[in-house]
Amino acid sequence: MQQQNRYEEYAYVLAYEPRGKSKRVRGREGFIIQAIGERYLTLLELLGIPNISVEVGERVYIGREGRTKILSVLGKLEYDELSTFAKDALPEVIELIVKNNEKRFIEFINTAGPINPRIHKLELIPGIGKVITMNIIREREVKPFESYEDLYKRTGLKDAYRLIAKRILQEITGSERINIFVKKMQ
């Protein structure tokens, strides 16, 4: 069995400051980038290569070898440590991640189970109540969903990626007790 990476390979840029100061590494200055990891949805502070150009929403490689825009990953950030600009960009960038990783989130919808006898994981997604949850479960037993479009056609659940993104944002901001997508920081 293949070993699962415990670190992010890619991140999406939320904000950057060409002459910024790190919140994670004391005395570190330079091209500071605030980003969100693609796999674990971790908020990160990155050190960019001087004089490179990045765009908000851009997917950058932050894996161990072969980086082209990032010098190093400085550390994890809490939501409250994000700049106002990064906080403003976060909802749109999360939506982009959920759209770009459709297979992964559809897999969640196909396999999500109950948390306890009274509540199902699907019900924690805004806009999905008991009736839609039961409809999704019934339909996925017939045949697993293949895409957001397939989910919409068979259950009437419109813009599922937006609803998932909304839930992820709630988890990142810390307004939820139970996390289903974002790992809580220790």
Image (cartoon, rainbow, N blue to C red):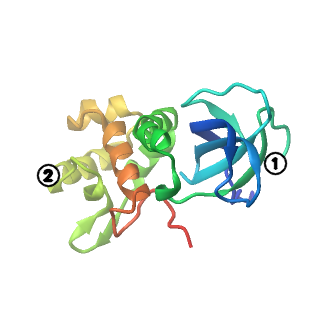
Q: Is residue 27 above or below residue 68?
A: below
Count of picture labels: 2
Give the residue type at disc 2. Answer: Val
Residue 128 visible to the viewer: yes
Residue 24 x/y as whole percent: 67, 59
Q: Residue 131: which disc? A: 2
Q: Residue 64: which disc? A: 1
Q: Earlier in the sequence, mark 1 or mark 2?
A: 1
Q: Give the number of the mark in front: 1 or 2.
A: 1
Give me the residue at 68% from left, 35% from top: 60
Secondary structure, mark 2, is: helix
Give the residue type at disc 1. Answer: Arg
Q: Nearer the viewer, residue 176 or 158?
A: 176
Assess disc 1: are there few (<14), some (14-19) or many (≥20) residues with their C-alpha within 10 Å of its C-alpha: few
Q: Nearer the viewer, residue 33 or 157?
A: 33
Residue 41 x/y as whole percent: 53, 51
Image quadrant in which the C terminus is located: bottom right
